[in-house]
Amino acid sequence: MTEERENRSDRENRAERENDVDGDDVTAPLLEIRGLSVSYRTRGGTVAAVRGVDLDVRPGQVTAVVGESGSGKSTTAHAITRLLPGNGSIAAGTIRFGRHDLAALSEAELRTVRGARIGLVPQDPAVSLNPVKRIGEQVAEVLRIHGLATRRSAPAEAVAVLDRAGLPDAAVRARQYPHELSGGMRQRVLIAIAVAAEPELIIADEPTSALDVTVQRVILDHLQHLTEESGTAVLLVTHDLAVAADRAQRLVVMEQGRVVEAGPTHDILADPQDEYTRHLLAGAPSMATTRPRTAVPAPRADTAPLLEARNLVKEFRLPRTGDGPRTLRAVDDVSFALHRGRTLALVGESGSGKSTTARLVLRLAEATAGQVLFDGTDVTTARGARARQLRRRAQLVYQNPYASLDPRFSVAEVITEPLRAFGVGDRLSRRDRARELLDRVALPAATLERRPAELSGGQRQRVAVARALALSPDLVVCDEPVSALDVSVQAQVLDLLAELQTDTGVAYLFISHDLAVVRQIAHQVAVMRAGRVVETGPPEELFTRPRHAYTRELLAAIPGGRAPSCASGTASAVRTR
């Protein structure tokens, strides 16, 4: 009985702390959600995505919503501004924002709130930016709509907003189109659009998932500055627990559409009450000790590499500015070798040339200079049958699961398309192969009949991994393959990649801004900056004894260092691994 009274007292004290974040129990919530339920109409019936969610966001604070892919995080965020897909609807609940119930407002009334008072940073920049408009025009349009600039002043104001969001060479970037920017640069454009009107609330749906750690720190510092200086509230949706631990005063944990735990971030990380929260913390690669990699013997000195880049150069013409035409050297004299059964990771900031290098070695872009050798053959200028053979033996997992999957195809068609293209098997055997691959990437067989739009971002990326593996290639180029995945699925995919490498000897060129992930999977790491490789070495050596100042800067920017100790280990463990 005494123990029961003590447990009840602990729960009561915890509830008091939840209502008194940082000692401020008198500040009324800016956003107050009660009993929110959201459902989607699908061909298989109605699916409940969010079930009875209660959530508060107070001025001047960051509230983070965390959970696995499909837990309802993004659906909750989009329900607030009523930007759900056409088959989604709010089934029950209220969304109080100031004097408004957003769930009951008309579309015309919502337009006076969205953008001006609530800014949204969506998860996917590829589908959120207009591909046929220059970046500056899209930011200027937001300023004009909300009466913050005239047609004459808007272009200059747009450049200033982009500069504040941390976009380098903002005047040049403003004249470019979205496809001419890296994924991280496009994400910063979305952040610029969201904060342009200085809203009271910013809903940030995975705002840094496409960003490297140094730019991530700049963006999050900017959001934190807004909360501290102007009282802006931030609802941060993220699968990165280290980011949430660093930046949020309150933490909301969601599982299968429900809130399973909520309260001050420090309390939840130090003493998680729900088993699911403990599961998330244990699986976080940025907050737990590194899982051991499967030992792979070093290649013999006389063994020819599977892939070799020799002095690669790629130049792009930039738009004319006041200084005249300019050329950007995105890849500058890059050389490396990758052997069978090994993983080479390219790391660096957004715009450092990582993804461009990957496109060059796959012959998806023409090199300005240099050579690419695949299995001893020069494929730098391969055409026709030679290029097609390379396509079969080298596959790519794109960074963006929203843009890389054909929305008209079912998942079964997406995965089996490479098999059909190369005439591998019949319809029955191809479907069996698709079912096998789905199982290996932790998706149920029923997913075969669904379309990409019916899947979460993490589920789409797992489908993309399955598709890349369909032809059992010799080389897989992984361009940020797990950046969209929650921690538990991320661990499953990394384990899958390691298992396949052990079984088949496949080589990976692994591009990532997540150094904790790189340390788990890579045998060799090349650090890129401004198109050049500045340091290479095994991850154990490079992350513990970095020689180059830029490598040390990347390591210092890894999130999780501000977090308290938690039940599964310390959040700052990534700094000392």
Image (tube, rainbow, N blue to C red):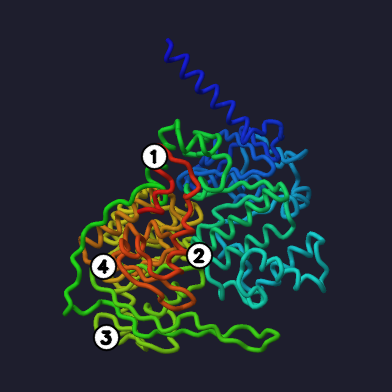
x and y percentages locating residue 58 in the rendered image: 67, 40
Which of the marked residues, 4 or 1, is nearer the chain's N terminus?
1
Residue 508 lies left or right of residue 557; in this view the side is left
Front-lying residue, 159 or 407: 159
Residue 502: quadrant of the picture: bottom left
Name the quarter where the C terminus is drawn. bottom left
Which residue sits at x=32%, y=63%?
539
Mark in front: 3 vs 2: 3
Residue 342: numbered disc: 4
Mark 1 residue type: His
x and y percentages locating residue 308 in the rendered image: 30, 80
Which of the marked residues, 4 or 3, is nearer the chain's N terminus?
4
Name the residue beneath numbered marker 1: 279
x and y percentages locating residue 323 in the rendered image: 68, 87
Mark in front: 1 vs 2: 1
Mark 3 residue type: Thr
Q: Is residue 431 above or below residue 20?
A: below
Q: Is residue 61 above or below residue 522?
A: above
